[in-house]
Amino acid sequence: MRRIIVIGTTGSGKTTFARALAHRLGVPHGEQDAWNHQPNWQVAPLAQFRAQVSLFTAQESWVMDGHYSKARDIGWARAQTLVWLDYPAWVVYPRIVRRTLRRVVTRQELWNGNRETWRGALLDPEAPLRWFWRTHWKRQREIPELVAGFPHLRLVRLKSPGEAARWLQSLNG
């Protein structure tokens, strides 16, 4: 298990989990959000984003988080394991609210100088507070079918933060 993708709905803790997993295994961590969100919230050109995913996943071992369909054919094809943080809505949505509030109030820089704002958090249809409602249940339905298209992948489906913590603790680096 040396090439791993961590997926889950927005706010499920993909990046936090993936960082911890990469640290535990002693492998590089890549975050697709950082490659996608350019300065001023501009979306990276498709070729540039795919090249970054391709470059990162060409390494011998890695953990990458993100669920971008525009590079799934690259990352999922090269991965050995897919870790799905499949938490219930009642766990995830309060996390998104707390995270968004913290980011807006502290003016936390996310990627490439970008910061969340009240206006963006409440009005932007792509902001996590709204994106969650459009994608959470859809992803729960579509992910098993998507994984079936990559039969070489070992699927690890974790249904609670406690289960995820126990699984992470069970790994030997």
Image (spheres, rainbow, N blue to C red):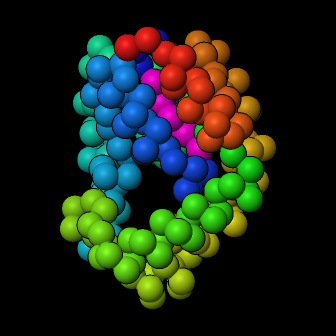
Query: Which of 16 and 142 lies nearest the eye of the viewer?
Result: 16
Quadrant, the C terminus: top left
* Residue 42 included in the magenta stretch of the image: no
Query: Which of 114 and 25 lies nearest the eye of the viewer?
Result: 25
Where residue 135 sits, quadrant-wise, is bottom right
Magenta span: chief secondary structure: strand
Query: Which of 48 and 37 lies nearest the eye of the viewer?
Result: 37
Where residue 64 sits, quadrant-wise, is top left
Vertical side of 30 occupied by 40: above or below: below
Q: Position of residue 6 (x, y in %)?
A: 50, 35
Q: Position of residue 40 (x, y in %)?
A: 26, 73
Residue 11 placement, left or right of 46:
right
Residue at 48% x, 66% y: name it: 99
Identify the residue at the far bottom of this view. Answer: 119
Q: Position of residue 112 (x, y in %)?
A: 22, 62
Vertical side of 140 occupied by 90: above or below: below
Vertical side of 68 occupied by 92: above or below: below
Residue at 30% x, 50% y: name it: 35
Vertical side of 147 occupied by 132: above or below: below
Q: Is residue 64 visible?
A: no
* Residue 5 included in the magenta stretch of the image: yes
Residue at 69% x, 45% y: name it: 87
Residue at 54% x, 17% y: name it: 170
Specify start and end residues of the magenta stretch as a single range.
Answer: 4-8
